[in-house]
Image (cartoon, grey):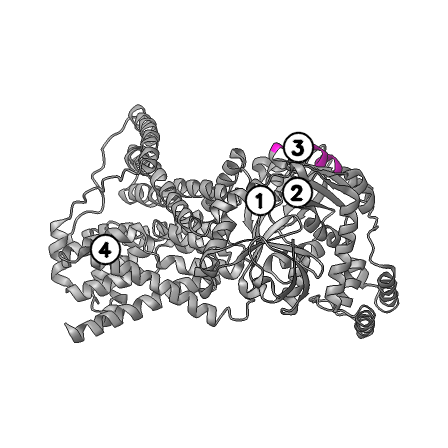
Amino acid sequence: MTLAELGIRQKGVIVSINTSPDFKKKLMELGLFPGQVVEIIQDAPFGGPLKLKVKDYCLALRREEAKGIEVKKIEE
Amino acid sequence: MKNKRIKVALAGNPNTGKTTLINAIAGTNLKVGNWPGVTVEKKEAVIEYKGYTIELIDLPGIYSLGNQTAEEKVAIDFLLKEKPDVIIDVVDSTNLERNLYLTIQLLELEIPLIISLNMWDEAQEKGIQIDYKTMERLLCSKVIPTSAVHKKGVKEILENIIQVYENKKFVQCTHFESEIEKYLIELKETIEKVQPVLFDLIPRRFLVISLIEGNFVFEDIDINEKIIKKAEEIRHKLEKIYKKEISTLIVEERYSIVISIYEQCVKRDTLKDIDTTLILDKIFLNKILGLPIFLFLAWLMFEFTFELSAPYVDWLDSSLSNVIAVWAVQGLMAVNAPEWLQSLVSEGVIGGVGFVLVFVPVLFFLYIFMGILEGSGYMSRAAFLMDRFMSFIGLSGKSFIPLIIGFGCNVPAVYATRTIENPKEKILTALMIPFMSCSARLTVFAFFVTAFFTHHKALVILSLYLLGILVAISVAFVLQKTYFKTESQNFILELPPYRLPTFRYIMISAWTKTKAFIVDAGTFIFATAMVVWFLLNVPFGVQDKEHSLFGHISKAIAPVFQPLGFGYWEASGALMTGFVAKEVVLSTMGNIYAGETLKEEQQEHVSLKDGLKEIGVGFINANIEVGKKIFSVFGLIGNEPEEEETDSTLLTAVRNQFTPLSAYAFLVFLLLYTPCMATIFAIKQELNSWKWMGVSVGIGLTVAWVLSFLVYNIGRIFL
């Protein structure tokens, strides 16, 4: 499944990143590389971006871009 | 004896308190400007400390040392070319893991590094224990806990700058996996053999890693073919061994150093970790409440900027024209100065100063409010909430606030684009702002609707506002699809923790930025005002404006407006002064059409005592007025709009020359062409570019002419 399909307050482990090489590098430099745990915290109204938690900080990604990140859901 | 000069660069991620730190070190010595050729803000300061001259340069906030964004290019360019003696790496202690990634990259530059573990207090409160002594050992660099907001650690930073500078030693002790390091050495040896001069130009480790990654362009440096071949060979080998792309491999290697340091130095007491940001975001980013709260804040900011500054603007204006100008004339009369000189000083010079000063209170209040929104971390929430609505024209939510400010006055609106880091978004927003109909344009609209559209006043004015918005969106859309189409569309936005901004910091930064306006744009505005004075008064002693140089130019350009229905020199003259400021359009028209004198009745004589009293009392009254306004803003009591008296002579004269249709075409032109000289110089200063200023004026004039032409000629078919 992709990061965009993860629900609010759900966690997942990044499996792979399938975006343009430049964007992939950027994401990885921000700590989003395979093996990293991410959690969806909130989403913006009207299908806006997603707020997610990575390491010790939060960042926002558009849904379109979150579709490029393959994750494995962590069941709690 | 001359002081030793130390060049220090401050580097770090965005939202690490870098600016607060440089403020704490430099105080009011801080200068704000732009990096040459780009729209990225530059802050620098020179301070004296213990016999050393320390030059501090604040690099733009970056997440990595790449060359993808304008900020990254500025930073790497500076570090490679200017070769600072010391780098201070400002790190957010509460978010160490991601911050240390840049630290590892900075160490690759082989420049002595001091790490400032900023927001130390906040980390302690959150239960994050950092063993900075161990970190020092693992990174072979000085690590200093700081809390810029409380000025903690500032002295230690200064002491260590000197120490590190005198040592002149750099030790590299962070390494990749030994297999990869072996290849790095291999490439180093090749360079040593083939082209050793490269190492004098570019730091060794940075050079070999960049060559192996193969994505760094070293402009104006020719690299030997053999070295490039060798680097490619190593890249392919590594990709084969590790079965992943080289850039992935390098990023992961850096992060593995980071993670190992993090695990050895950081202990977290999770019980203490109550996340207030999480709770606040539940409110501010709430799906139902988020947008209304944002719109309320945008409205509040608009009120704050314009309502609270208005009494000070009036006070400055009346002090200048009722006291200072009168004094100047008195003084000049006393020495029998000719009349033209009196007019030059009182109208030209003092008037020109006035044009600049009236913006000072507005900008100061704007910067205070922006400082609060930005310093608290709310601005990125605004971007988050509005992204859905702004992204289709290539903008993010951060553009929304400057555009709203534009309805009050375009000048502060242009400066409000400073919060937009992305240069493309910033340029697009600055180009849209002139189409937001400001309050000065409203005075002209109001006069014309009274003259021609008595029964549809509101409708006509509303149509003009909407037309402006529509044009702004179209301009952004077209530029987005043509000029900026190659720009990456990716959106990554950090949502930093909410923090309480400090009063001192907000005041200092508001003042520094206002000062930058006075020096930069102010000079040009003043110069333009002087030129206009000459045009209006040459030949000297001219009474009728028709015979001034200004009148001749107006006549020469009048035919351009023939196809739009108002090809008279009076109309083109009014538009010409509208280029200076829309506030003066009506008084120019009064002067031209009705032959009224532009000069208001001035008081003949003001004694020193009376003058000072007027200025002093005026200032106190302005403060009282502000107090009242705060109440009315928060008490939601609307101020009664002042009833403007409409000049009947002018009304008749204008009715004789314009038809309702040509009047509307005139208003369309007035709405869309260059708002005023202050706005265009603001665009020049903020975008740091004469080119974009020219583009803005060009688009304005073209769109204004074309739409006005269409309105007039299509209208003629139906009417």
Task: Identify which residue, B409 or B568, lies in the foreground.
Answer: B409
Q: Which chain does tag 3 point to? A: B
To which quarter of the image does residue B250 belong?
A: bottom right
Q: Chain of mark 1?
A: B
Cβ atoms under marks 2 and 1 closer than 8 Å = yes
Task: Pinpoint the chain carrying mark 2.
Answer: B
Residue annotated with mark 4: B445
Residue that mark 3 sits on: B152
Kindly identify the amino acid type of the residue bearing the numbered disc 2. Thr
- Disc 1 with disc 4 on a shared chain: yes
Question: Which residue is located at x 71 percent, y 61 percent?
Answer: A34
Q: Chain of mark 4?
A: B
Mark 1–mark 4 Cα distance, whole angstroms, equals 45 Å
Which image quadrant for residue B324? Answer: top left
The N terminus of chain B, quarter of image: top right
Out of B453 and B278, give the one closest to the viewer.
B278
Sequence-wise first label, 2 or 3:
2
Checking the image for residue B94, the label placed there is 2
Give the mark toward the camera: 3 or 4: 3
Relative height, residue B22 to residue B393 (above, below): above
Q: Earlier in the sequence, mark 1 or mark 3?
A: 3
